[in-house]
């Protein structure tokens, strides 16, 4: 089973867990989970199919799989008791019984994430009647998962043809009982869970300016303008989402106001009323030169959220104002190259006075089979592996150049 596939399955169990009182999916509500200090026993609903296995996999199709999963919000973060079996090649495979499927699978304890960590902990997987049974008798792992005595756990059952929607069932606590957590233990668990959240979550802030790379120098031609934004990116494992946050205009500053100015859009008359735009502030280039833009007193709800790195309250970014440009050129400009060849590309930037502007990084975009690449470099080394057409594009500020290269077979 691939790491990404494990991430998708275990994350699905947690993300789609039903809220208390919501109707349970058909079938999974028959799952029984009993917990004591010495044993966890999970009895999944009876299987109704009499055919086990999967057909051959066609090109581009997903791998077939069987999975029986119980996810618990443990004292150190969520964990999953997982029995799974995945198609590892394109061939069809059949099993004579459910017992053969279970015997071929692997029972492990897994943590969520794109790079998922799974461990063999001595969990047994058996079949009782037509029901899959998971049994764990490791008191240390049981304490890690159930010391807070969660009332419910999330369950999932996957098959090659059709899978149940993840559901939620109650945990039954039996003798010898796990003791009820006291206030000191609850406080310690709260601290440990926050540490776990900080280990998997990252919050970053950055100054945005049009389509410029987040950490690169902002390039702006004299007389041009670009909108400034203050951006916040929230990542959990490798899944990220971002948005803009607001700060007062007084939070923005420039080290040298003769090179550029920070302005706010003026009001627009609409229906006889003056309305101010929510866009801005924005930068205006005044003369060629380099300075630094700064923003301070940044605050949002993220200030108190757990994050791997501290969330900054102030930022800065370099601004370079250029003379008015005439064009950029990609060099060299081959019409054809042989498959397997590597070409080192660079750009030449010319201003309207005919002078070359140096010291600029180029945003490169290359589309060569079988994949595309993007990067910010002074030059770009491109290897042309497959025959056909390839595209090389370069951007400096708002100036763009591109070329199409025909890749021909290598000469024998």
Image (cartoon, rainbow, N blue to C red):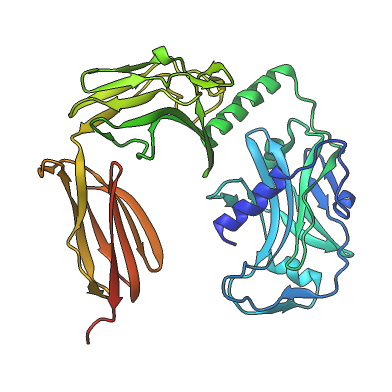
Q: Please, is residue 174 above or below residue 93 in the view?
A: above
Q: Quadrant of the N terminus?
A: bottom right
Q: Residue at x 69, y 78 (%)?
A: 55
Front one among 383 and 144: 383
Farthest residue, direction front? 272
Residue 331, image quadrant: bottom left
Residue 125 is left or right of residue 339, and the answer is right
Residue 172: horizontal and vertical position, in percent?
A: 87, 40
Q: Residue at x 19, y 64 (%)?
A: 333
Q: Residue at x 45, y 25 (%)?
A: 310
Farthest residue, direction bottom? 412
Front one among 129 and 5: 5
Counting every numbered tag in the picture gives: 0
Residue 146 shows in this picture:
yes
Residue 337, image quadrant: bottom left
Residue 26, image quadrant: bottom right
Front one among 79 and 99: 79
Front one among 296 and 95: 296
Q: Please, is residue 159 above or below residue 221 in the view?
A: below
Q: Quadrant of the C terminus?
A: bottom left
Residue 141: horizontal and vertical position, in percent?
A: 68, 41
Q: Please, is residue 231 above or below residue 410 in the view?
A: above
Residue 138 shows in this picture:
no
Residue 160: horizontal and vertical position, in percent?
A: 73, 67
Residue 153: horizontal and vertical position, in percent?
A: 78, 41
């Amino acid at each position: 089973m691939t790491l990404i596939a494990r991430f998708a399955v275990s994350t699905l169990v947690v993300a789609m867990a039903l809220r208390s009182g919501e109707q349970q999916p058909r079938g999974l509500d028959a799952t029984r989970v009993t917990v004591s200090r010495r044993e966890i026993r999970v009895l999944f609903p009876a299987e109704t199919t009499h055919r086990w296995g999967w057909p051959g996999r066609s090109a581009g199709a997903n791998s077939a799989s069987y999975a029986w999963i119980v996810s618990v919000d443990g004292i150190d973060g969520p964990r999953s008791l997982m029995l799974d079996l995945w198609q590892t090649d394109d061939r069809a495979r059949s099993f004579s019984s459910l017992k053969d499927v279970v015997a071929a699978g692997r029972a492990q304890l897994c943590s969520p994430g794109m790079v998922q960590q799974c461990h063999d902990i001595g969990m047994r997987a058996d079949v009782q009647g037509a029901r899959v049974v998971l049994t764990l008798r490791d008191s240390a792992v049981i304490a890690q998962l159930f010391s807070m005595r969660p009332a419910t756990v999330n369950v999932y059952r996957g098959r090659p043809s059709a899978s149940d929607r993840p559901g939620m069932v109650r945990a039954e606590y039996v003798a010898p009982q796990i003791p009820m957590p006291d206030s000191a233990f609850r406080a310690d668990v709260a601290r440990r869970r926050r540490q776990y959240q900080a280990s998997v979550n990252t919050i970053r802030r950055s100054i945005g300016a049009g389509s410029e790379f987040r950490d690169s120098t902002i390039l702006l031609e004299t007389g041009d303008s670009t909108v400034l934004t203050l951006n916040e990116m929230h990542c959990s494992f490798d899944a990220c989402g971002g948005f803009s946050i607001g700060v007062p205009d007084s939070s923005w500053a420039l080290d040298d106001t003769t090179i550029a100015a920070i302005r706010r859009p003026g009001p627009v008359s609409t229906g006889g009323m003056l309305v101010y735009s929510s866009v801005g502030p924005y930068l205006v280039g005044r003369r060629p030169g380099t300075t630094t833009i700064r923003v301070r007193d940044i605050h949002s709800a993220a200030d108190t959220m757990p994050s791997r790195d501290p969330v900054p309250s102030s930022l800065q970014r370099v601004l370079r104002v250029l003379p008015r440009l005439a064009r950029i050129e990609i060099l060299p400009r081959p019409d054809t190259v042989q498959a397997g060849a590597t070409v080192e590309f660079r750009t030449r930037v010319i201003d309207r006075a005919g002078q070359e502007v140096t010291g600029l990084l180029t945003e490169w975009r290359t589309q060569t089979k079988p994949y595309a690449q993007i990067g910010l470099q002074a030059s770009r080394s491109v290897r042309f592996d497959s025959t056909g057409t390839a595209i090389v594009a370069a951007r400096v500020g708002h100036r763009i150049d591109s070329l199409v290269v025909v890749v021909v077979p290598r000469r024998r």
